[in-house]
Amino acid sequence: MTAPLFKGVITALITPLRDGKVDEAAFTKLLERQIAAGVHGVVPMGTTGESASLHPEEHQRVVELCVKVAAGRIRVIAGAGSSSTDKAIELVRHAKTVGADGALVVTPYYNRPSQAGLAAHFEAIAEAVQLPILLYNVPGRTGVDLANETVARLAAHPNIVGIKDATGDLARISWMRANIDSQFDLISGDDPSYLGYHAHGGVGVISVTSNVAPEGMVALHEAAQAGDYATARQWQDRLIGLHKGLFLDNSPSPTKYALSRLQFCT
């Protein structure tokens, strides 16, 4: 079995803003802190990065900046989702051009396509660009759920290498582990349930909490990875209040507030 392409703690980066524009200095400071804390990767321009709210040129600039600052020290998985298949292809192609290691592609939102439509969307993207793609299922945000059977179909494509599952439903990972090739990366998108997700066979988490507490999330993951679940549970207990606090209001507002108190953004 080959090692997972994407694994460990992967921070879903916020996008710092100042006067309505991307604050590149603050973004760079935040990214350097993530690298120093030992995270294994980052996602610029995902849900937490407010990709749906930024101008396409800003989206592309943030991805370019992230790749430049990371400079190969950690993996960069560029957020590249859109309800438009052509637009998603454009974003994935841009991610490849600037040197990202992969693309995180969310299910089309608002239009609520069928499972056949979802499969066609992702397959078209995977065929168009030779870049590793992570599926992203977050029905609470998009209004559409990527069914297990559809994930299994898509996992057969060589450019689709894994999934970020933000449902928090641990039964899903058990089904996927039993029915999908073991080389398919199973990554949680739900911080509070990550310890359980890891115990069920997950290889990593795309984390909101690690924006604020990267060292704690790395410690939890490394303890779980070593089979030291007693220590992992201690970290889980220390972090659970923060997990919940960062979603007291619509994300990423609480995370940005916490980082402003830590002087990482305004």
Image (tube, rainbow, N blue to C red):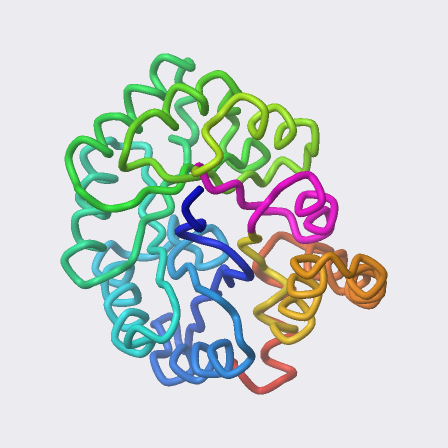
Q: In this view, does 46 lie to the left or right of 148?
A: left
Quadrant location of the N terminus in the rendered image:
top left
Residue drawn 69% across the image and 39% down it: 200
- Is residue 214 on the magenta stretch? no
Q: Is residue 145 left or right of residue 107?
A: right
Q: In which quarter of the image is residue 121?
A: top left
Magenta residues?
184-203
Residue drawn 51% across the image and 63% down it: 11
Between 265 and 216, the one lying in front of the other is 216
* Image coordinates for residue 97, horizontal then vertical, percent: 14, 57
* Image coordinates for residue 235, horizontal then vertical, percent: 79, 66
Between 53 and 228, the one lying in front of the other is 228
Q: Quadrant of residue 221?
A: bottom right
Between 86 and 151, the one lying in front of the other is 151
Residue drawn 26% across the image and 26% down it: 123
* Image coordinates for residue 60, horizontal then vertical, percent: 23, 60
Q: Where 98 sits versus 178, above or below? A: below
Q: Quadrant of residue 202?
A: top right
- Is residue 201 on the magenta stretch? yes
* Image coordinates for residue 25, horizontal then vertical, percent: 37, 85
Residue drawn 32% across the image and 49% down it: 103
